[in-house]
Amino acid sequence: METKILTATDIPVAVEFLREGELVAFPTETVYGLGAVATDAAAVKKVYQAKGRPSDNPLIVTVSDAAMMRKYVAEVPEAAEKLIEKFWPGPLTILFKVKPGTLPDIVTGGLATVAIRNPKDQLTQDLISQLGLPIVGPSANTSTKPSPTSAQHVYHDLQGKIAAVLDHGETKIGLESTIIDLTTKQPIILRPGQISQQELAAALGQEVLLNSGKVADSQVPKAPGMKYRHYAPAAQVIIVDQPEDFAELKVDQETGVVALDKVLSKYNFVNTYSLGADLASASHNLFAALRYFDQKASINKIYVQGFQTGSLAPAYMNRLEKAAAGKHYR
Ligand code: TXA
Ligand code: MG
């Protein structure tokens, strides 16, 4: 199969591919997603195959607005109405009780809940509203690789396996959406993202828990996907928490260094990838940096700057900890 790169004027072509049961990758403000009609079990099965994704890991359902969401959920709690009003369209995925019989089991992994997302990207909103049906939307990478923040990343991983990529340039945020579970007694964040714990608590007027992924408490619901290896380049990733620690690093031809401009400009590291000026640009650039060094067979170790403060820090560190399998410089 030849994978086509489509742009804004090709939306009808993308709609037709989806109607025929083919896969189309689509842009969002977080990362690119891999779309198939969510009500078409055979098409959704191809998504798992193309990504090499374990079949017990359920998919996000992507809608063009809240009205479309209401057709697939059993109930909309008051808290969800508040968050939708404030954050949709935007980088927030909400777990609902699924309306029985509306979505195939392959989408939800047979769970009683469904994760629904309304991304802020005009091309994708047009795509879904013209299709008139929701699409599944896992990140459009090969399973275990960093999520794609450009159409080129998608093409690299999935060329020949999907019908098309709808190209809308680099994604803005660069880290996947915040996932919140409102089906539990207390709202709990299953995956941190740009919309922070503090913002969610303020919007709800209620405490919101953050599942750090570190607790082994079986009472705490988890996003099933969080148990898998993730964002992992072939090289060993090591987190450098303090900027001054970069001064001591033993760096050779086989080492990559990923840090802010102000850190990189102090030293003469051979292989570098800039995270830009601040934590926002670092979040935007993290996955591209990991992919950049993954392409270089000679690199066997990658030092990446960590961040302890800033509202994006929990989301950034959550992805980086997974890429590094928890390994810190000290
Ligand atoms: O920003 C995003 O959310 C991107 C863009 C493309 O929309 N999508 C994305 O999808 O990150 P994915 O599949 O890579 O991650 C979704 C996570 C997985 O860890 C999955 O296990 C979890 O959401 N998930 C999906 N349905 C769930 C459910 N019913 N209950 C708990 N977790 C669920
Ligand atoms: Mg993913």
Image (spheres, rainbow, N blue to C red):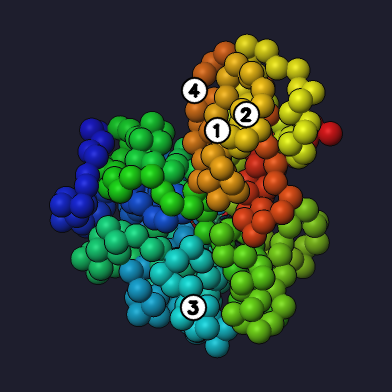
Indicate the amino acid at tag 3: Lys
Indicate the amino acid at tag 1: Ser
Determine whether label 4 and label 3 are within 8 Å by CB: no
**Quick one: label 1 or label 4, which is nearer the N terminus?**
1
* Circle 2 or circle 4, nearest the eye: 2
Which label belongs to residue 176?
A: none
Instruction: Read off the residue under disc 3.
Output: 86
Indicate the amino acid at tag 4: Gln
Drawn side of residue 192 relative to residue 93, left or right: right
Drawn side of residue 7 relative to residue 264, left or right: left
Determine whether label 2 and label 1 are within 8 Å by CB: yes
* Residue at position x 72%, y 78% in the image: 207
Q: Label 1, label 3: how many angstroms apart (C-alpha)?
A: 33 Å
Estimate the x, y position of residue 312 in percent, counting from the top left: 62, 56
Estimate the x, y position of residue 287 in percent, counting from the top left: 53, 39
Give the SS element for disc 1: strand
Indicate the amino acid at tag 2: Leu
Instruction: Read off the residue under disc 2.
Output: 264
Give the crowd class for mark 2: few <14, some 14-19, many >=20 residues within 10 Å: some
Which label belongs to residue 295?
A: 4
Drawn side of residue 114 relative to residue 16, left or right: right
Residue 102 versus residue 94: which sits nearer the camera? 94
**Quick one: label 2 or label 1, which is nearer the N terminus?**
2
Q: In this rendering, does residue 45 appear at all? A: no
Q: Label 1, label 4: how many angstroms apart (C-alpha)?
A: 16 Å
* Residue at position x 42%, y 56% in the image: 29
Give the crowd class for mark 1: few <14, some 14-19, many >=20 residues within 10 Å: some
**Quick one: label 2 or label 4, which is nearer the N terminus?**
2
Determine whether label 1 and label 3 are within 8 Å by CB: no
In the image, the residue with mark 1 has its CB under 8 Å from the nearest atom of ligand 1 = no
Residue 69, above or below 216: below
Which label belongs to residue 274?
A: 1
